[in-house]
Image (spheres, grey):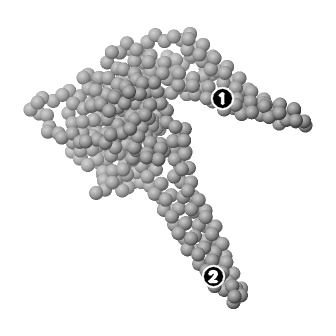
Amino acid sequence: MTADAPVETTFLERRRRLALRGAASALFVGIVSFPLGTAIGGSETADTIGGAFVFAGIIGVVAAPWIVRAWQGFMRRRMIAAAVAGRPDIRHIDGEHDRRASEAALSSAAFSLGAFHDSGLVEAFQAGTVQHVLTGHARDVPFAIAEVALLDAKGYRMFGGVLASFRLARPRPGLTIVTRDHGVLGNLLASAGSRVERLPLEDTDFEGVFEVYGDDPVGARVVLTTTMLERLKALDERAHARGFACAFRGEHLLIAFSGMSWRCPAWRIVRPIDAWLHDYAEWLAGLVELPQDIVRTLNLAAPAADDAPRYVPEVVPAVAIDSGPADVFSSGLWRLVGEGGMSLVYVASGTIFGGVALIGGWYGVTEGYSTNLFWYFWGLIAAGVVYGVYALALGLRQLAHLAWRWNAPLRTLNRP
């Protein structure tokens, strides 16, 4: 299918060479201009020239990675479009340039971003940004696969990767979650405080691969057959994501690939297009074929009317969807700085002021203060100790709360 779709390799190779030359030139300017700028000086004119060289070096160092980044974005759009070329049942939506279509695709019967709330797949979020969406029908089952970033109310990123949703013809009662196995301690920490319970797998061959959680053991056994577990394992290996998890919830099969990106690696800019284009297109084509694999495995043929279970669809919350990449300052690092930075300030200030107060108290006990300054110094010492204890406790509490929520989506399913 799409791996053999016509791609303008000559045009892509020309763009790759142009981007490589631009990035290399910018990096060369950045590396050369700094020492030249610092070496030139001694007069007003020379200092001006030296400053210009330093400024040019800064521009070059900043421009080089952005040129590579722009080339990656260009290649992603071209390769996703090539992967679905000639497929009337699958449509590619460029979220960076077609906001209305991406919003419609992620607020449909096939894919509702609000369905990922309380699914145990992602941390609690308030909004999302979308880059690219693949949507369509696989054997009459609506689906959508989107590369997204999910943000909380403060704008910090809770999730970055790919989310997929398939509308099931037969709703599944309860909630069944499948994640990677993280060892005894890791699994215990991941599910601590969650209302879902660990469910044993019938097939022991997958015990070291997956962990299953849910609130309906019977429904989980029906869904997670050996064939299904094999398909999930193959899907996990194909995606090349840092994390894989899926959930059977009501009318949807929800899948989350944390850390997965459809952007080709930056290092490929140094290799000719013909050396890797075909393999990259095959990888993307495999992701496009994912709906057919899932449908074939789950056998999602619509049940007869008399066999259809009575299912009341749950109301999912509305989620604000934006187009284009998430803001740079919404990354996980900035979330750690933003939420943990002030906590560390509290810990540091509490330690310093409390420590100074304790040293002053020790001096007062061992050496003593003069009578006229006795209450003054002991008042300051008491205030320092109280503040130190309060600030230290507040900072540690906030850090513990952040650590408890960090990358622990199962804990969003709080116990009643």
Q: In the rendered image, which quarter is residue 180 located in? A: top left
Mark 1 surroundings within 10 Å by alpha-carbon count, few (fewer than 14), some (14 through 19), many (20 or more): some
Picture coordinates of residue 216 (x, y %)? 23, 47
Which of 203 and 29 lies nearest the eye of the viewer? 29
State how far apart marks 1 and 2 are (Cα). Answer: 58 Å
Q: In the rendered image, which quarter is residue 273 located in? A: top right
Q: Earlier in the sequence, mark 1 or mark 2?
A: 1
Picture coordinates of residue 299 (x, y %)? 23, 28
Q: Is 297 placed above or below 19 here?
A: below
**Of the numbered discs in the image, which one, if any, rests on residue 378?**
2
Q: Amino acid at mark 2?
A: Trp
Q: Residue at x 59, y 16 (%)?
A: 15
Q: Residue at x 66, y 32 (%)?
A: 62
Q: Residue at x 43, y 45 (%)?
A: 152
Picture coordinates of residue 73 (x, y %)? 53, 25
Q: In the rendered image, which quarter is residue 52 located in? A: top right
Q: Amino acid at mark 1?
A: Ala
Mark 2 surroundings within 10 Å by alpha-carbon count, few (fewer than 14), some (14 through 19), many (20 or more): some
Kind of element beneath mark 1: helix
Residue farthest along the front direction in this orientation: 44
Kind of element beneath mark 2: helix
- Would residue 59 be found to the left or right of residue 273 on screen? right
Counting labels gives: 2
Q: Indicate the quadrant containing the N terminus: top left, top right, bottom left or bottom right.
A: top left
**Of the numbered discs in the image, which one, if any, rests on residue 63?**
1
Q: Specify whether residue 305 is in view.
A: yes
